[in-house]
Image: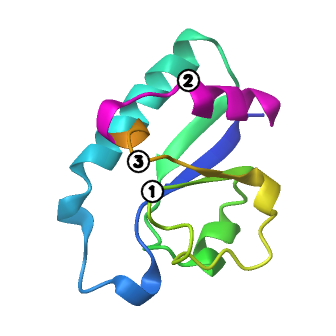
Amino acid sequence: MTKLGILVYQSLPLLIGNAGVFNHKERAFVQQLNREIKALDLDWEIRLDEAEGDIQVIETLNPQVLILKNGLQRQFYAGDFDKQRIYQLDALELATKETRKLMAFLKQH
């Protein structure tokens, strides 16, 4: 069974309209990450958050991990989601598409 990870890149309180047009970097990062996962034959799929940071909607997808964009660590409400299953991207990982630490995190889960 394929495990699911969700990249959360926005939080509900800060939204003004649909931010979908501003997610180019995040979308490219998820595509890169999924290519690497496939090349390593890992049982993971990473998706971009389509719930606009709404944890109640996100939880209905039953993700095994959440990946938070840098800056969301204090803004995103994770509810009862296990904090050990939340990965916080650092300032450069998204910009440089550096996936090494995140891949290690996924392998642990």
Q: Residues within 10 Å of mark 2 (few under 14, many from 20)?
A: few
Q: Amino acid at mark 2?
A: Arg
Residue 80, picture quadrant? bottom right
Q: What residue would you read off at disc 1?
A: 70
| Of the image marks 1 and 2, the number of the one nearer the N terminus | 1
Q: What residue would you read off at disc 3?
A: 91
Query: Residue at point 22% right, 48% down?
Result: 24
Q: Quadrant of the C terminus?
A: top right
Q: What secondary structure prevails in the magenta region?
A: helix
Magenta segment includes 100: yes
| Of the image marks 1 and 3, the number of the one nearer the N terminus | 1
Q: Position of residue 42 (x, y in %)?
A: 68, 20
User: Image check: 95 left or right of 10?
Assistant: left
Q: Tell me the element at label 3.
A: loop
The region drawn magenta spans: 95-109
Residue nearer the viewer, 96 or 38: 96
